[in-house]
Image: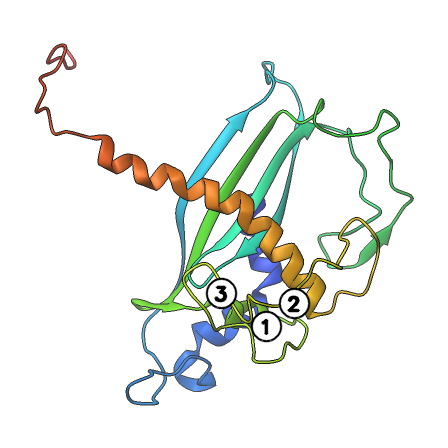
Amino acid sequence: MSRTHLVSYLFRPSMRRLTHNTRSRFILDPRTGEPMRGPLGILLGSVQCSFHREVGPYQRYEVWSKVLCWDRKWVYIVTHWLPRGTAVPTSWLDPGFGRRRVRGQADPQGGWERKILATAISKYVFKVGRFTVHPARILDDAGMLPERPGGWIEGGEEQLGDMEADLSDVDLAVEGEWDWRRVEAQRRKGMETAAKFHAVDEAKSLFDGGTNGALALVGPG
């Protein structure tokens, strides 16, 4: 539900255009130039979750989700579970989409690692029918990306734009303008984590189909 709320809010302009793609002509068939046909699909590719601490029976907790990064196919979302009331945002939207602001509650001890109950990474793909929509098109249309020379949709499967650009001078720990260089630096940092997420997919090669036998054949009853 947390991820659904996040995606539905952040990408709602793009989702509306994709839902009525034949009229909006947002995504065109590269072969014919005509709008792609089919229903909008936002599909969950996989989830990997790590539990750091016990979640006790009836314990109240909060779920915090944000966009981690994206590549040419997937949008990655990272989700953290924390005990209820552990963190207070400096601002948030109420159910009527009115912004509320408070003074955030900083962690006086420094670092959140000791308080996080669990962490998960999920990856989503956007579809019009069976056609995969580049995530950067979704983010850009939703007003989430600054202008970037050459655009955001060039490059390999996990790389976009000019990957030769030197961003070593961008310090993400220091507040600064979110121009394309800062956004790209943050995306690259997120992809370092997402790349490890892909390693789970490689585990398919470990199955031998029973070539070396099995311990037992069991089932219900």
Q: Amino acid at mark 3?
A: Pro
Quarter residue 81 falls in? top right
For the N terminus, which image quadrant? top right
Q: Please report contact status of discs 2 and 3: CB closer than 8 Å, yes or no.
A: no
Disc on res. 80? none
Determine whether 190 is above or below 134 in the image: above
Residue 111: x and y, percent? 77, 30
> Looking at the image, which residue is at 46% across and 49% down?
123
Q: The residue tagged with tag 2: helix, strand or loop?
A: loop
Q: Is residue 6 visible?
A: no
Q: Which residue is mark 2?
A: 144
Dot 2: few (<14), some (14–19), or many (≥20) neighbours within 10 Å? few
**Pick the front one: 96 or 50:** 50
Image coloring type: rainbow
Q: Would residue 159 be found to the left or right of residue 145 on screen?
A: left
Q: Please report contact status of discs 1 and 3: CB closer than 8 Å, yes or no.
A: no
Q: In 3D space, how far apart are the residues under numbered discs 2 and 1 (Cα atoms)?
A: 6 Å
Q: Which residue is mark 1?
A: 140
Q: The residue tagged with tag 1: helix, strand or loop?
A: helix
Q: Please report contact status of discs 2 and 1: CB closer than 8 Å, yes or no.
A: yes
